[in-house]
């Protein structure tokens, strides 16, 4: 496969083992652009074996998967630094995926999809709720970012203007949701039966969960846990949020709106 982007500087061809081949095939089938990163910036090197998708294909049980990062750890710099990305994706997210899959097995959770699990998440353990949210929310977070970002247009921009008056007004309200979330959590732009709305959830909850006060179909999600920004921004969550817009992939948001 020919890389369409040159995000990661000089690189050499690598030999794929079976695992990498499967990941590559999956990513290609999902239409993702594979960024072939080098050395420590290769996200596949930190992926936990238990998080891999091929196992899910052979299991009838629900299994969360950690998406292949479609860009390198340093690709969102200077807004999000490489070290934060490496730890966030390789450690935090990988652990959520591993732990929710453990909880599904331990509690014999019969849901067929993450959405189905979230709809009745109050029936299950804190382990299932926190790690299920963590696994799903971060896949969305990686997906709605890309190097250089993009701009909303068409139907999505119309929906934003209709709900909030303007893109700037929407960004202001979203930033406030992120700032007002005390402690750890997420800010969300959601679709509520055709109307866009903004809100936030604590910890790793999301608007698909029955326990959430704020509900809807997530279109855009911003992680406001300190682990998402502390290395670079320390206590300045407001700076992380204002810089984050420069890496938002509005094309991915538009796809979710459908
Ligand atoms: Mn996080």
Image: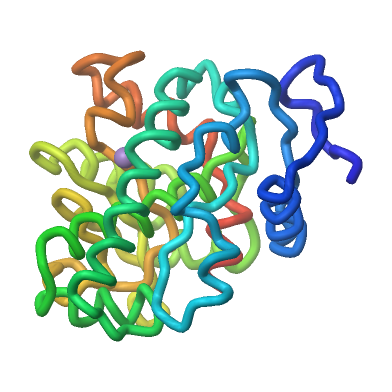
Q: Where is residue 203 in the image (x, y as percent from the top left)?
A: 16, 49
Q: Residue at x 32, y 83 (%)?
A: 111
Q: In this view, does 66 lie to the left or right of 250?
A: left
Q: In which quarter of the image is residue 165?
A: bottom left
Residue 190 is left or right of residue 119, and the answer is right
Total number of numbered discs in the rendering: 0
Please identify the quarter of the rendering in which residue 192 is found.
Answer: bottom left
Name the residue located 65 percent from the left edge and 19 percent from the top edge.
39
> In this orientation, which residue lies closer to the viewer: 44 or 229?
44
Going 44% across and 37% down the picture, which residue do you hit?
A: 89
**Is 60 located above or below residue 246 in the figure?**
below
Q: Quadrant of ligand 1?
A: top left
| Residue 132 locus on image (x, y percent) | 28, 61
Q: Which of 50 and 70 is in front in this view?
A: 50
Quadrant for residue 62, please give it: bottom left
Establish if 186 lies above or below 113: above
């Amino acid at each position: 496969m020919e890389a369409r982007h040159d995000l990661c500087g000089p690189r050499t061809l690598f030999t794929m083992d079976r695992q990498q081949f499967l990941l590559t095939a999956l990513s290609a089938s999902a239409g993702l652009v594979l960024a072939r990163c080098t050395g420590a910036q290769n996200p596949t090197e930190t992926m936990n074996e238990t998080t891999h998708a091929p196992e899910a294909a052979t299991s009838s049980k629900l299994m969360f998967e950690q998406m292949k990062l479609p860009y390198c750890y340093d690709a969102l710099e200077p807004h999000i630094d490489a070290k934060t990305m490496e730890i966030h994706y390789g450690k935090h997210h990988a652990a959520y995926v591993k732990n929710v899959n453990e909880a599904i097995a331990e509690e014999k959770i019969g849901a067929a999809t993450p959405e189905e699990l979230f709809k009745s998440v109050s029936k299950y353990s804190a382990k299932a709720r926190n790690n299920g949210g963590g696994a799903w929310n971060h896949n969305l977070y990686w997906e709605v970012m890309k190097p250089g970002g993009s701009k909303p247009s068409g139907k999505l921009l119309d929906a934003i203007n209709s709900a909030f008056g303007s893109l700037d007004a929407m960004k202001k309200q979203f930033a406030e949701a992120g700032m007002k979330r005390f402690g750890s959590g997420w800010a969300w732009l959601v679709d509520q039966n055709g109307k866009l709305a903004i809100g936030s959830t604590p910890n790793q909850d999301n608007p698909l969960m029955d326990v959430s006060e704020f509900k809807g179909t997530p279109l855009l999600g911003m992680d406001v846990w300190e682990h998402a920004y502390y290395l670079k921004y320390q206590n300045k969550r407001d700076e992380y949020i204002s810089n984050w817009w420069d890496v938002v992939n509005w094309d991915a948001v538009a796809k979710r709106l459908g």
